[in-house]
Amino acid sequence: MPFGLKALRLPRQRNEDLILWGFSRLCIGMRGAKAFLFYKATWPSIERR
């Protein structure tokens, strides 16, 4: 029984870590996309100068 509980608890913990990792990666990706869009929007005006 304890082994079964341990086996059940482990994947859930791993899933939570995976969700946290995915969320952090998503936040980093969104920040990168925003920076890229900002750079793309401002680059023509910088190039024109």
Image: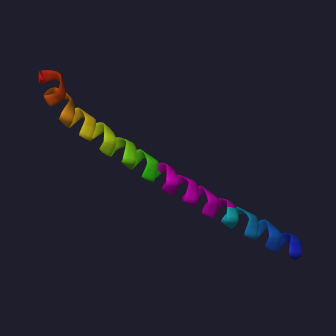
Q: Quadrant of residue 45?
A: top left
Q: Looking at this view, is 48 or 17 the one in front?
A: 48
Q: Looking at this view, is 47 or 9 the one in front?
A: 47
Q: Quadrant of the C terminus?
A: top left
Q: Quick one: which residue is furthest to the front in this view?
A: 49
Above or below, comparing residue 6 to residue 28 in the picture: below
Where does residue 44 sit, x and y in percent of width and height? 16, 27
Which span of residues is magenta-colored?
14-25
Where does residue 13 sit, x and y in percent of width and height? 69, 65
Q: Is residue 10 left or right of residue 23?
A: right
Q: Quadrant of the N terminus?
A: bottom right
Q: Is residue 18 magenta?
A: yes
Above or below, comparing residue 36 to residue 8 in the picture: above
Where does residue 18 sit, x and y in percent of width and height? 60, 56
Q: Quick one: which residue is furthest to the bottom in this view?
A: 1
Q: Is residue 15 magenta?
A: yes
Provide the major secondary structure of the magenta segment: helix
Q: Is residue 45 left or right of residue 3?
A: left
Q: Residue at x 23, y 33 (%)?
A: 40
Above or below, comparing residue 29 to residue 49 in the picture: below
Q: Looking at this view, is 47 or 13 the one in front?
A: 47
Q: Residue at x 26, y 35 (%)?
A: 39
Q: Residue at x 19, y 36 (%)?
A: 41
Q: How many marks?
A: 0
Q: Residue at x 12, y 22 (%)?
A: 48
Q: Quadrant of residue 32?
A: top left
